[in-house]
Structures are given as structure tokens and as C-alpha cells.
Image (tube, rainbow, N blue to C red):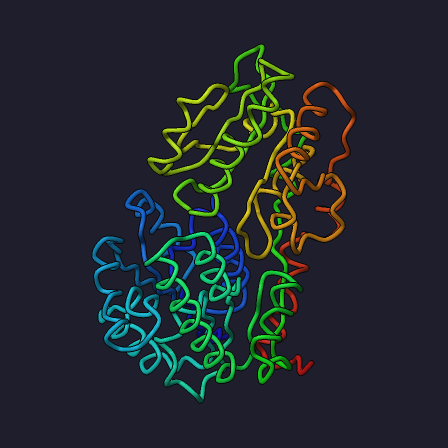
Amino acid sequence: MMREKLLFLSHRIPYPPNKGDKIRSYHLLEHLTRKYDVYLGAFVDDPSDWQYQEKLKNLCRECCLIPMNPSASRLLSLSGFLEGSALTLPYYRNARLGKWVEDIVSGHSVKKMVVFSSAMAQYVEKYEDCRRIMDFVDVDSDKWMQYAKSKSWPFDAIYRREGRLLEKYERKIASEFDASFFVSPEEAALFSKIAPESSQKTYHYCNGVNAEYFSPEQVHSSPYGNQEKIIVFTGAMDYWPNIDAVEWFSEEVLPKILERIPDARFYIVGSNPSSAVRKLAAQEGVVVTGRVEDVRPYLYHSKVAVAPLRIARGIQNKVLEAMAMGKPVVASPQALEGIMENEGCMLAENAENFAVHVAGILEGKEAAHGRECILKNYDWEANLSGFSLHLEGECIS
């Protein structure tokens, strides 16, 4: 029996699943390929990701992967000032991808479309006769508004403009598409408040965790020094909220911890560390690893994971993975937003709270962990089942 065709568009290649949006997009894609012949269109912004194109070609019926030069794309995005549009849209505009989408839709009678990230919706706006499902993941427009609050002129004005115009576009897409999904109930509720005209077709599905892969029962060799008491942060270190988080923790929290525990070490584990992050390695007690092949040894042999994000959207995979590994987590309110049953997570609202909680754990204070919460609430297949029903038009509420 012939399988139905489906177009899947993503702003970033959905493999490997080693960072927030790629974890979600990969599991969504893999879930869809079980039922549909999937035609995948995506950008590749990290040259090291080209090695994975064969993996995706084996998974999908056809792939169109477009190289992206971030510097060139930033220049192209400036045309948004002339168009009166959000700069995000021309940043992701590409004639080759647009032609490929047209050829796939017309040549293969595609009637179902899944779009991952709002900027990719521009490629399918005209296909009103198709069933189109949008995975916004986060309310990106609100993220730009958050950025604006922490920036000085002229960037604060530019970011506010981006937030305002991207919100206008998000509302347009949500009104035209058959359903819109977000990463948490809180994100869906926020968007429903922003776009009440689309609230009846706004939903969420939570991220999942591969609990067998991120398991405390698997033993890993230690990447640390024998006498070190490890605090770990994991994440893509070219992402501004992560950069802001580790800078703040290194400067405001870690010195307080070192006063009590001189052999404490703060490991910043993640790819593409910015110059600001690399400079932190000069501070006492800070280690910047750069890209690692596997974050699990760093989590497994740490004493505590921290998530001191001050700007955050949706569910933080770094928190879920640490919980799955059976590690106590100390996190800001922003980092815990959307996470169900925060067992195993200690809330810290300021530098003093962080220092007290983390130091206590390093000194041997008993701390709970959240693996049971992960097993109960964060299974990919269970969480994606509702998405599939909406794609088939079987859910009306």
C-alpha cells in the first residue's frame, strides 16, 4: 500500500539530536516517517552537520538541505527593514528551497505539511488546500521582547521591532494553519493570550527524553580531576541565553561557592563557545570544554547540574536530561517553566539561593532527583500521539 506524502520543513537540519530544537525536530521527524513518506527541507548552519545527511536521506523519501552562511544571512535579513517585515523572514528566505518545495508539492501531490519554526511557514503560505500543522516550539516574538529588556540602544529598539513584527506574522500563520503547537502548556497559554483568535486550535506537546540513553545505570569514565567537586552546565554555548546564564553564574554565584568549597569547579559543557564564554575559563574555578562527543559522562560524574537561565522559553532539555540521569538540579524559575512535577529540582531565585543550594549539595547534603518525573511525563511516543491525531484531522478540541 502506498504511503501518504508529507512535507516537513525545519529552520535547522534535524540531526544530530544534540541541542534543544534539534532534539525536538528529530523526534518529530522520526515519528512522522513511521507513517508517511517524508520530504524534508532544512538549512545547515553548522558545517560539521553535513556528515549526517546520509542518515536523513535514509530516513526520508527525499531531502533538500541548504547550506546557510550566518554572516550572509544576517546581511540578507536587513531587507526586512525595507519590506517592513520581521528580519527573521528574509534571514531564512532561499530561492532554491522555495523552488524545491513547489516541485515536491506539485510533483508528488503532497496534501499534508508540518512546519517547524515560524520562519519556515513562508514557503507554504499559498497552499491553503493542504492540511498544515505549525510547530512554533516557543513564542519567539516574546523571546525578542525579553532580549530587548537586557540590551541598550540601538539593539533594544531593533529587538522590540523584531518582537512586534514577528508576533504579527505568528498570528497570521496561526490563523491560517489548521493547528499550532508549542513546547509546554505555559507557552500555548501565552500564545492563546497573544492570539485569542486562534486559541481554539492552539495546543502543546511536551518534549521527551530517551530515558534508556540518559540513564544513571550506565557507567561512564570520568572526564574530571579526582579531587574536583563538579557543578555542570550543558548547552549550546553560542546561544545568547546560555551565554548570559554562565556569565552570570561565574561572576555572581561561583565566587560565593568557592569561599566555602575551594575545590568546586564549574564546567561549561557545550559546542561553539562564544568569545565571552571562552574568556570565563580565565576565572578561578571555571572550565570551558567546548564540543564534547557525549555529555553523559559530564553529567554522570557531576555532583549537581545548574540551569541559571535568566531568559528562557519553553522546556529546557538540559534540565530534563540531568533529571533523567538522576542528578539534583538547581535552576532559576525561568529554566523550570513548563516542567511538570519539579521533583529533583531546587528553585533558586537569586545568586544567594544558588550558592546556598549548590554548596549544600557539594558538601554532601542529601538532594532528591527527578528521574521518576521523567519516566512518568516525558516519553516521546506518548507525547507525540496527539500531534499525529491533529495531523490526520481526527482531533477537533
The residue nearer to you, when weighing 220 against 234, is 234
Q: Quadrant of residue 366?
A: top right
Q: Residue at x 53, y 60 (%)?
A: 28
The residue nearer to you, when weighing 170 against 22, is 170
Q: Quadrant of residue 397?
A: bottom right
Where residue 63 sits: x, y (%)?
Answer: 34, 62
Q: Is residue 135 left or right of residue 211?
A: left
Where residue 301 sits: x, y (%)?
Answer: 60, 23
Rendered position, 49 above or below 57: above
Task: Looking at this view, name the residue that lies furthest to the front.
Answer: 153
Where residue 72 sits: x, y (%)?
Answer: 21, 57
Where residue 347 sits: x, y (%)?
Answer: 70, 42
Q: Is residue 295 left or right of residue 58?
A: right
Rendered position, 159 above or below 272: below
Q: How many marks?
A: 0
Q: Is residue 9 left or right of residue 194?
A: left
The residue nearer to you, when weighing 150 against 189, is 150
Q: Residue at x 50, y 30 (%)?
A: 250
Q: Residue at x 54, y 68 (%)?
A: 35
